[in-house]
Structure formats: structure tokens, C-alpha cells
Image: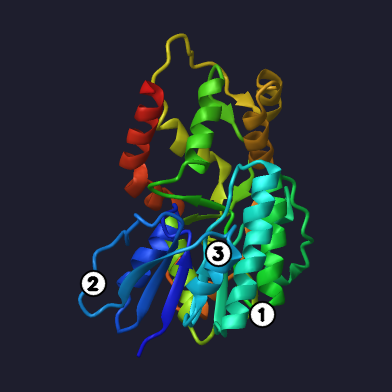
Amino acid sequence: MGPCILITGATGFIGGRVAALAAAHPGPGTVRLLVRRPDVRAAQPPVPGGPRTTTVPGDLLDPGSLSRAVEGADVLIHCASAIGADEEQARAVNDEGTRALVDAATRAGVGRIVALSTASVHGRGPFHAATPGSGLPLAPGSVTSRTRAAGERHVLDAGGTVLRPHLVYGAGDRQVIPGLVRLLTALPGRLDGGTSLHSLIDVEALAGALLGAALSPATEPGPYYAVHPEPVPVGELITAAEGLLVPRAGVTEGPATDLAGARELLAGLSFARHHLDMLATDHWFVDARPWRDLGCDPGPRFTDGFAAHRPWYREAVRRATVG
């Protein structure tokens, strides 16, 4: 009999990919999706020879529902989080909700807990080839990052495993590439982002790493950086986003604006400051263990991976522009 895998956040950008991969995993067992609405059904049809997928009602804000959901589960993959929420909601979901979930899983005897976090728990860089053993302090700079750092502490204290990606891209991304497109659209011309390096990962590869960490006998407690082995030069990121821009009247091919100039031009836009601060410094993390020890695939390098997702991004930008 295969394991019973409980997945939270299974209707989200990343958790949905994890649920689909788990449902297609060979061998018997059960994939259990924690859902807040009773009308939600499994995103993927049953796969012949794969685990049976079921849904269970539950909410991170309702500890009683969590106790019922974890009963009989062998593995927990926690992908649910509140991103961009106000402080009260972020704390209730990312911190207190994770604590309630981990406590329930521990009481129920769940054998392994794997949680999705973010490298943003370290705050802003520069981070140049930073490894898990390099002693980076936790210095989150936003409400989302602070509460996610608090949430991952509950997982780590329970002997669980945390995966920390930096930038995640792919179909369904509403933050990374769309944020860059929005930034570039606000500028009068091209952006010279400098020479910084950034760790990215395709959403499918990240989902594979989460499932791999949940099932591999080689998984260790503690944090992993879930990032592609090759960092991405900032110029490649900007070029990818520029290729999605809708032609604008009055934009000339003059000299590119550097980051300092962009900050001055967009000083009144808080979202622009966030992205410019990120682009300005290295956010490069190194961790071979997910790919070397857990048998997971890091996916394509960014240029190739982005090309596969470009049609989805083009349509998403088109819809945003029309809306």
C-alpha cells in the first residue's frame, strides 16, 4: 500500500502542479487535497495505476478541520500561503495556520512534513552563490516574508523539510514576469538592469522537487534552496519581459534608463521600488541536493523554459491590457 499524501494549496500556482504530479505518481496510495470549499474537486482525472485522489474540507484558520484532514496521512506537503495579504491575514494563515497544521500533523503521526517557503525570508541581497550552510540570517523585509519565515520555523521545529525557491516562473505566474512587464511598461524606454544574477526555477521543476522531498528516502530535515543550478543574468530576465510588451505610442529608442534613473522616474510607485530593489543586487543561491540526492530534475535553463511558457504569458499580458 502506497503512502497517503496530504497536499495543501492544491488549487494554487505551485500546489496545483504538485497535486497533478502526485496524482500521476506510479503505484497505489492516496493523494488527499485539502480544500476550503466543498465544491472543489481534484484538478486531475484519475491516472490508471496511480494513486486515488480525494478532497477533504479544511481551512488553515480552523484547527478542528485540520485535525480531521491529517488523520491517516503519511506525508504532508504544505503549499498554502497568503501572499500580498494584509498583516493580520498573513499572520493568521502563514504563521498561526501553519503552526496549527503542523501541530495536527504531529499529533496524527504524519511521518514527513515538507513545506514550501521562499528565499525572501533572508531579505534583500546581495546573495552571491549562497548555500544552505553559509549561515545566512533570516531578515525578511515584508509582511509576507516575515510571516512565512515564522511559518517555516514551525515546520523546522517539528523536524520537517522546507524548500526555498527565489523566483518561480511558468504558466499561472502572476508575480514574477507580470511584475517585470508592469515595471517596464511604466518606463519611457528600455531598462538597463546592470549585471546582477538571479536564481529562478520553472514551476514544474519546483513541484517535482516538493514531491521528491516528500517521497525520497534521502530527504533531510531542514531548509533546501529549490533553484536551477544556473543563475540568470538580469539582462535575460529583462529581455524576456520586454518581448511581452504591448507596443506603445511615443516610446523612442533612446539610451536605456539605468536603475538609479528608473528609481527617480518611478519614485511614487511602490511596486516599482520592490522590483528595482530586487533587480539591483545578486539573488543567487546554490543547492545541488534536490537534483543530486533526491533524484529530481531542475528543469530547463531559463531561456528555454521561458520560451515554452511565452504563449501563456503573451495571452495573460493581452488580457491585462484589454482589462
Quarter of the rendering containing residue 219: bottom right
Decide: is 132 above or below 86.
Answer: below
Judging depth in this view, the residue of 18 and 41 nearest the camera is 41
Residue linked to disc 2: 47
Residue 38 visible in the picture: yes
Q: Is residue 205 left or right of residue 189?
A: left
**Disc 1 vs disc 2: Cβ atoms closer than 8 Å?**
no
Q: Amino acid at mark 1?
A: Gly
Judging depth in this view, the residue of 252 and 99 nearest the camera is 99
- Between marks 1 and 3 in the image, the one whose residue lies nearer the viewer: 1
Distance CA(mark 1)–CA(mark 3): 19 Å
Q: Is residue 69 left or right of residue 162?
A: left
- Neighbourhood count class around disc 1 (C-alpha, 10 Å): few under 14, some 14–19, many 20 upward: some
Residue linked to disc 1: 159
- Neighbourhood count class around disc 2 (C-alpha, 10 Å): few under 14, some 14–19, many 20 upward: some
Q: Amino acid at mark 2?
A: Val
**Whole-percent x and y of residue 231?**
56, 55
Residue linked to disc 3: 226
Q: Residue furthest front?
A: 64
Judging depth in this view, the residue of 89 and 145 nearest the camera is 89
